[in-house]
Image (spheres, rainbow, N blue to C red):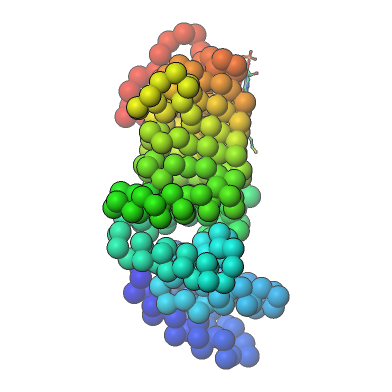
Amino acid sequence: MIDEFRAATLDRRMWQHMPGREAAAAAWNRTGLWSEIGRLAIEMAAREPLLRHMLDETVLSRETPAEVVGAALSRRLGSHRNHDAALEALVIETLHEDPAVLPSLEADLVAVTTHDPACRSSLHALLHLKGFHALQAHRVAHSLWQRGRLDVAHWLSSQASAGLGVDIHPAVPIGKGVMLDHATGIVIGETAVVEDDVSILQDVTLGATGKERGDRHPKVRRGAMLGAGAKILGNIEIGCMSKVGAGSVVVRAVPPHCTVAGVPARVVRTRGRIAAGTAAGPCDET
Ligand SMILES: CC(C)(COP(=O)(O)OP(=O)(O)OC[C@H]1O[C@@H](n2cnc3c(N)ncnc32)[C@H](O)[C@@H]1OP(=O)(O)O)[C@@H](O)C(=O)NCCC(=O)NCCS
C-alpha cells in the first residue's frame, strides 16, 4: 500500500504542472485506499481552486500515508507554525515506529465511510471529520503511552481535548474499525476498553461511578453502538453488537446482542425481538 502511494507521488507532482488533470487522475486510479485518497484530492483540487493549497499541503505534496496523517492532524490540532511542525513530526515518527497504528487508522477510515451516511469519501473523513481526527490523535497518544512516553502522550491527548472536545485517556486501548460520530463531548476514562467495530456518538461518557478505584471504567465489546449522550458508568460490560439508546444512563452490564434504553437503562430488545426478559447468547453465534 505504501509502495502504491509512493508510486503515485510522481503522478501527483506531474499533475501540479499539468493544464489538464485527466492523465494524472487516471494514473492515480489504482486500487488501494491511499491511491483513492490521492485521486480524490486531485479531483477536488481541480474542482475547487480555493482548496488547492490545503490539498497540496495535506495530501498532494506528501510522500507516504504517514506524512498525510501527520499533516492532517497537525492542521487540525496545531496552534502555531512551530507547534504544527513538532506535532506533525511526532505523528509521523509514531506511525513509523509502531506498525500497528496505520492499519487501525485505515480500518477506521473504512468504517466511517461505510457507516456514516454523511461521510462522502475517505478523503472527506481524512480532511474534515473531527471524530476521525480525535481517534487518530488518540491512537498516536496511546502508542506513545504504551512505549513509556507518558508526558508527551498526555500532552497530545490534552491538545485533542482542548481542540476537538474529545477527552480520551491515553491509556485506553481502542480496537480497529471504530467510529466516533460528531464526537464533541465524548469522554473515555483511564481503565475503559473499546473493542473493534464500535460506534460512539457525541456526548457519550465511559466513566467511573466515583465509588471505585483501580479498574473502574466500562468495557465496550465488539460491534456495540453507543447512542448520543449515553452515560455508561462503572466497570461494566456493554456486550458485543449491543446498542445503547441515546440519552440512556447505563449502570448495569448489558448482555450481547440487545438494545437498552432509558434512565436507568432497561433492555428493550434482544436479538431483534422486543425484550421479554431473556438474556442473549454468546457473541459468536451471529
Ligand atoms: C435505541 C435505538 C437504537 C432504537 O433501538 P430499537 O431496537 O429499534 O428500539 P425501538 O425504536 O423499537 O424502541 C423500543 C423501545 O425503546 C424506546 N426507546 C428507543 N430509543 C430510546 C431512547 N433513546 N431512550 C428511551 N427510550 C427509547 C422506544 O420508545 C420503545 O419503547 P416502548 O417499547 O415502550 O414503545 C434508538 O432509538 C437510539 O436511541 N439510537 C441512537 C441514535 C443516536 O444517537 N442518534 C443521534 C444521531 S446525531
Q: Is residue 28 left or right of residue 22?
A: left
Give the quarter the ligand 1 occupies.
top right
Camera-nearest residue between 254 and 159: 159
- Which residue corresponds to the image point at 50% horizontal and 79% vertical from the top-left? 61
Q: Residue furthest front?
A: 151
Identify whether 214 is placed above or below 31: above
- In x, y percent, where is residue 211? 44, 18
Q: Which of 25 and 239 is in front in this view?
A: 239
Figure check: 74 above or below 245: below
| Residue found 42% across the figure and 63% down from its top | 91
**In the displayed structure image, the side of residue 169 where residue 41 appears, left or right:** right
Classify residue 124 as left or right of residue 152: right
In front: 148, or 19?
148
> Residue visible at 53% across and 14% down?
266
Q: Can residue 13 be seen in this view?
A: yes
Q: Is residue 195 above or below residue 255?
A: below
Of residues 217 and 158, the one nearer the viewer is: 158
Question: In which quadrant of the rendered image does the N terminus lie?
Answer: bottom left
The count of marks equals 0
Quadrant including the C terminus: top left
**Which x, y percent locates residue 53?**
62, 77
Instruction: Name the residue located 39 percent from the left edge and 80 percent from the top edge.
Output: 7
Picture layout, residue 92 above or below residue 197: below
The image position of residue 4, as x and y in percent, is: 37, 74
- Residue 238 appearing in the image: no
Q: Position of residue 172 (x, y in %)?
A: 39, 40
